[in-house]
Amino acid sequence: MSKVIAICNQKGGVGKTTTAINLAVYLAFSGKNTLLIDIDPQGNATSGLGINKHNIKTSVYDLIIDEIDPNPIIISTGIERLSLIPSTLSLTGAEVELVGIMGREYRLKKALAPLLDLYDYILIDCPPSLGLLTVNALAAAGSVLIPIQCEYYALEGLSQLVNTINLVKENINSNLEIEGVLLTMADYRTKLTNEVINEARKFFKGKVYQTVIPRNIRLTEAPGFGKPIALYDKNSIGAQKYQEFSYELLGVKKDKTSIDIPNTIPNNELEKVIGEEIK
């Protein structure tokens, strides 16, 4: 059975999609059959893997609203062992459409049932809200991964998120647990970063991962090229930290030689030019 993890935080700009993409990639590189589901109407996890949203005929919208077979929706990412259920702008109105549907909280869970024996990990990139799409993800998941930005107001609203998780656990999905809390966008030059880290560890106790993702320009550049950090710049500090995080989540010891990451190959001449300018 798949381990289904919803990556969730109602606050935007915390590194949620960056975490979803890069964790999925490193799980795949570790030999785990992985499915990433983009349930955010913005579709950033889709475009961040180099998929042109305008060319997508069927998406997670059709999976949830029309209940079509999930297999034709699943697309290849070009990375071995990593598949994607993409999102498009059609998902924008899904929450309104779901309101009048019976069993609306379970639509995603029902759709994923035939896929649970096919993947080791299913990751769900949630929208930055606590609406019906996020509730669908929480109903389908076994656990929640919470990225938290190491900045002011980072912990604000977390009690609301935890309350939502507890409500879902009490009324919809009794198996739901907090997988862990990942601290992101850390800037150790500031006192504030260390304060947020200490507060998060105090609030969530043993649920906070030891790995902390730092601010890294290469991480912010990679989505513009439609690539995960491992393929954009595998030697960057951002890549190293997401690799460490994947080891921590898997519960294995850090071994830099155990993941064979291919060299980045530019997709076209324009990318070559832009890539050289960025260097």
Image (spheres, rainbow, N blue to C red):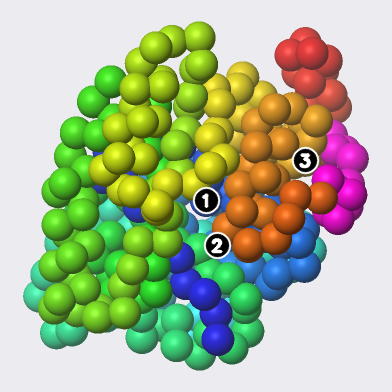
Q: Which mark is residue 231?
A: 3
| Residue at x 41% of width, y 20% of height | 193
Among numbered discs 3 and 2, the one appearing first in the sequence: 2
- Residue 23 percent coordinates (x, y): 60, 52
Q: Residue under circle 1?
A: 20
| Residue at x 13% of width, y 78% of height | 171
- Residue 71 percent coordinates (x, y): 57, 81
Amino acid, disc 2: Leu
Whether label 1 touches label 2, CB < 8 Å: yes
Q: Residue under circle 2?
A: 36
Q: Is residue 172 left or right of residue 279?
A: left
Q: Is residue 165 left or right of residue 249?
A: left
Quick check: 188 above or below 269? above
Q: Is residue 262 visible?
A: yes
Comparing 37 with 70, the one in front is 37
* The quadrant where residue 170 appears: bottom left
Estimate the spatial distance between the alpha carbons at disc 1 and disc 2, rounded to whole Å: 8 Å
Local packing at callout 2 (Cα closer than 10 Å; few below 14, some 14-19, many 20+) is many
Q: Is label 2 in a helix, a strand or a loop?
A: strand
| Residue at x 61% of width, y 19% of height | 217
Count the marks: how many? 3
Residue extent of the magenta highlight: 256-266
